[in-house]
Amino acid sequence: MALASTASTAASAPAPSSTPQIDTHGVRLEALAEAPLPSPLPHVEIVEPAFGDVLDARLARHSSVRVRAEGVALGAEREGVLVSLDGKRPRRWLEGRALSLGDLLADDEDLAVGAHALLAVALAADGRALRGQTPQGKRALSQVSFFVGARPQAPTEFPAPSLFCLSPTGTSYDKAGAPLLLDVLAFGAAKPSVRLRVRTRQHAFELPFDVDRAYSLSGLPFGDVWLTLGDAPGPSAQCVITLNPPVEARP
């Protein structure tokens, strides 16, 4: 399957498994077969902020993010490490480039007082998050929860359940309806049961979704597409992508 020409983390999908597909308004959702873990498995660890840290609300946006990554090609087109805060648009971790919590937010967005979740995860050669683990419990991802402002006095579910939509995001240049990788990770004592809400310029609809699987999503029209899972104030995440025709196909 040809790779999509992309300007961000949007990626064409690997071949789907033999599981039935779901087709709504011409949009097809197919679960992907589970991919074998590479050997040795990359090591990813969030160094800063640390689990349970309490950050000053006035300075939190400028707090540093530091990730230790071993055995993974940083900066590669599809491999590498993605970092995401509270399920928002992920950023690639690049060695030697400073990253702050504010870099993981929109320009006009504040880091709210309360609990937050930060994720760093290595990607396989096909662009999927390495979600499995070895028999020894080693994983190619790291997730930490921290607080902004005072730590709550009352008991709270910590780490809080969280969702991260890793792909697709950004801008993609490919033929109409080309398959894209849809990859979501979920954390928490009980993984949330969610449905995928798809919104295009023409339609808005829901599809059943399993957070333990990666999917091929095809049939989307050109233009902006919003893919939303969960509902605030509970666990939620959103991927936003702009689909354009290939540059060579433009008049």
Image: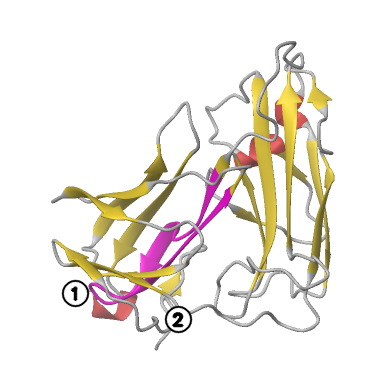
Q: Are marks 2 and 1 in contact (CB under 8 Å)?
A: no
Query: Mark 2 highlights which residue?
Result: 14
Magenta part of the protein: which range?
Answer: 163-186
* Cα distance between the residues tagged 2 and 1: 30 Å
Q: Is residue 6 visible?
A: yes
Q: Residue at x 31, y 62 (%)?
A: 243
Front: mark 2 or 1? 2
Q: Amino acid at mark 2?
A: Pro
In the picture, measured across the screen, residue 131 lies left or right of residue 68, that is: left
Against 20, residue 224 (above or below) is: above
Is-magenta flag for residue 130?
no
Quadrant of residue 136 within the rendered picture: bottom right
Quarter of the figure that contains the N terminus = bottom left
Q: Residue furthest bottom?
A: 1
Q: Nearer the viewer, residue 146 or 82?
A: 146
In the picture, measured across the screen, residue 102 lies left or right of residue 22, that is: right
Q: Is residue 227 visible?
A: no
Q: Amino acid at mark 1?
A: Pro
Q: Secondary structure at mark 2?
A: loop
Q: Nearer the viewer, residue 178 or 154?
A: 154
Against 30, residue 223 (above or below) is: above
Q: Which mark is residue 89?
A: none
Query: Mark 1 highlights which residue?
Result: 251
In the picture, measured across the screen, residue 25 lies left or right of residue 215, that is: left
The colour style of the image is secondary structure
Q: Secondary structure at mark 1?
A: loop
Percent x, y of residue 216: 37, 72
N-term mark: 2 or 1: 2
